[in-house]
Image: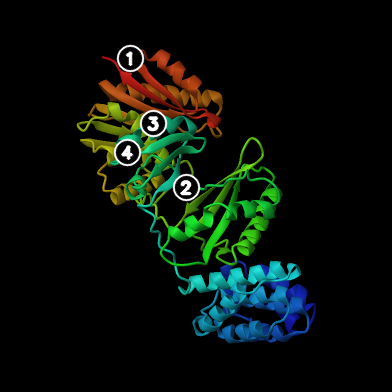
């Protein structure tokens, strides 16, 4: 027997018991059990007409948690007559969990009404919230149009982000990759280019994100209102509109980088989004879900912000093979960049081993860059190997995956290339990690053929240098600083005969 429900039926502490029941129903299993057992949702729906606004609010939210589809009509009717602004959003939150097909036209009409409405300062918060929830409802029902990116061959100023030490290799790759020649300059976030062949450039695997640069004449400082004014005076809105086929409104979010204080960061993002909505006359609509444009502001050393945009209307298909990951997985763009550094030493006739393969990121990206003759991958974790097999199949890479401790792995084949993404220290003591590196280097020396190459990513420079000294047949050719903050280094090592 649910004491909170029965207390509500008796009219006792209704608001408090609604809140407690709502908390319980956050767990879908509990909500389903209550719906199949003792709760009659029509009792809760009857409270939508209560004189207490907070009772109406919590009754609506509880019906949403209960997925009470039979009460969708009561919820919508209560939403239409509700005049207390902070309660209206509660009905919409509940309706998001239900099928609202019969009310789509009315919801869309209300949404368009709010788009054209300029709220007073004291009601802006609740109007914005209501409009955002309506937008989410319409988007999940397939009513709101999606925008189609069309800026592929216009002149674009874009930033391809990467780790700072990997900028120069990326710039060189861009110059070689472009058909028409390209302006490419190093940028704090990566490489900035001006190009008319974005459709081609976007397929490169070695950058992390593609961001559109903005032409802002003023330094972005001051209040959210001032920053919004500077942005509206830039090419931001023109760039968004000219890069898409369909017309406004465009749904966006604000992402603030480089601000450590969480409350300051959230407050700036919220107020700036509200100002952009107002100053764009509704062409830009803030949304925490279903957004297609991210306005990213990164705080610089002088305290101002550097602006750029990420268009989610540009579908990133580069790593569609990556269906499974684990917490320790290397990002495929980093793996691709490291493979590019290793490219001069790669061979189509190679027998390749990914020594600590995880979900197969290294071995897959190596073969997408240059197909090898034969591939092996080892990991002790069966879950990782299962994910690696699935990923390799999606990438159409043939590989022999083996669930085994690499320190116990044996092979009748000598390897011409070994890739290894060494694990972070984690809970291992220094002595345990040293022992692990000793075992790995023993294996590298044993498995590699003379003239073969070891491509090693590690955050433990001391252990790498120590075990290179102990294995004089393993000769360091190149060492690249990749991630200075975590002391991540990429080593290219050759086994001498």
Q: Is residue 276 left or right of residue 167?
A: right
Q: Looking at the picture, tell me which residue is in the foreground, 125 or 224.
A: 224
Q: CA distance from mark 4 to mark 3?
A: 17 Å
Instruction: Answer whether residue 404 is visible to the viewer in this image.
Output: no
Which of the 4 image quarters holds residue 209? top left
Residue 214 image offset from top left, x and y in percent: 52, 48
Check disc 4 and report its element: helix, strand or loop: loop
Instruction: Report the residue at 34% width, 24% height from top.
Output: 444
How busy is the neighbourhood of tag 2: few (under 14 within 10 Å), some, or many (20 plus)? many
How busy is the neighbourhood of tag 1: few (under 14 within 10 Å), some, or many (20 plus)? some
Check disc 2 and report its element: helix, strand or loop: strand
Q: Earlier in the sequence, mark 3 or mark 2?
A: 3
Q: CA distance from mark 1 to mark 2?
A: 45 Å
Instruction: Report the residue at 60% width, 68% height from top.
Output: 132
- Residue on which disc 3 sits: 169
Mark 3–mark 2 contact, CB under 8 Å? no
Q: Earlier in the sequence, mark 4 or mark 1?
A: 4
Instruction: Answer whether residue 104 is visible to the viewer in this image.
Output: yes
Q: Earlier in the sequence, mark 2 or mark 4?
A: 4
Q: CA distance from mark 3 to mark 2?
A: 19 Å
Instruction: Report the residue at 32% width, 38% height from top.
Output: 181
- Residue on which disc 2 sits: 211
From the image, state whether disc 2 or disc 4 is nearer to you. 4
- Residue on which disc 4 sits: 181
From the image, state whether disc 1 or disc 2 is nearer to you. 2
From the image, state whether disc 1 or disc 3 is nearer to you. 3
Mark 4–mark 3 contact, CB under 8 Å? no
Residue 361 image offset from top left, x and y in percent: 37, 41
């Amino acid at each position: 027997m649910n004491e909170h429900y029965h207390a509500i039926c008796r009219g006792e502490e209704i608001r408090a018991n609604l809140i407690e029941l709502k908390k319980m129903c956050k767990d879908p299993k509990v909500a389903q059990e209550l719906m199949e057992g003792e709760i009659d949702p029509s009792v809760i729906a009857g409270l939508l007409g209560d004189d207490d606004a907070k009772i109406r609010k919590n009754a609506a939210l509880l019906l949403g948690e209960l997925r009470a589809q039979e009460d969708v009509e009561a919820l919508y009717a209560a939403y239409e007559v509700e005049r207390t602004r902070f309660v209206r959003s509660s009905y919409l939150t509940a309706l998001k969990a239900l099928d609202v097909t019969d009310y789509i036209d009315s919801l869309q009409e209300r949404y368009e009404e709010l788009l054209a409405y300029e709220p007073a300062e004291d009601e802006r918060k609740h109007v914005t919230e209501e409009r955002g929830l309506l937008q989410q409802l319409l988007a999940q029902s397939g009513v709101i149009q999606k925008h189609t990116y069309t800026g592929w061959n216009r002149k674009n100023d874009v930033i391809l982000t990467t780790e700072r030490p990997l900028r120069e290799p990326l710039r060189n790759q861009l110059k070689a990759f472009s058909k028409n020649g390209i302006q490419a300059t190093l940028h704090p976030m990566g490489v900035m280019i001006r190009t008319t062949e974005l459709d081609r450039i976007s397929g490169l695997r070695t950058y992390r994100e593609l961001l559109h640069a903005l032409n802002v004449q003023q330094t972005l400082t001051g209040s959210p209102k001032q920053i919004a004014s500077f942005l509206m005076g830039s090419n931001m809105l023109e760039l968004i509109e000219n890069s898409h086929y369909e017309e406004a409104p465009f749904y966006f979010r604000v992402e603030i980088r480089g601000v450590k204080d969480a409350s300051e960061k959230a407050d700036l993002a919220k107020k700036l989004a509200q100002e952009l909505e107002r100053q764009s006359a509704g062409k830009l609509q803030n949304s925490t879900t279903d957004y297609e444009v991210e306005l990213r502001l990164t705080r610089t050393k002088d305290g101002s912000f550097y602006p750029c945009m990420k268009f989610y209307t540009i579908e990133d298909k580069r790593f569609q093979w990556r269906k499974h990951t684990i917490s320790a997985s290397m990002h495929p763009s980093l793996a691709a960049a490291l493979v590019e550094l290793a490219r001069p030493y790669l061979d189509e006739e190679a027998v390749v081993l990914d020594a600590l393969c995880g979900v197969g990121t290294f071995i897959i990206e190596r073969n997408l860059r240059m197909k090898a003759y034969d591939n092996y991958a080892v990991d002790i974790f069966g879950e990782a190997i299962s994910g690696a097999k699935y990923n390799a199949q999606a990438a159409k890479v043939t590989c022999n995956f083996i669930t085994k401790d690499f320190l116990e792995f044996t092979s009748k084949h000598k390897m011409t290339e070994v890739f290894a993404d060494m694990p972070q220290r984690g809970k291992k003591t220094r002595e345990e990690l040293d022992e692990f590196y000793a075992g790995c280097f023993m294996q590298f020396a044993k498995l590699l053929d003379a003239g073969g190459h070891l491509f090693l990513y590690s955050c433990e420079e001391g252990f790498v240098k120590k075990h290179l000294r102990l294995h004089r047949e393993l000769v360091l050719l190149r060492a690249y600083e990749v991630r200075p903050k975590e002391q991540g280094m990429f080593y290219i090592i050759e086994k001498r005969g």
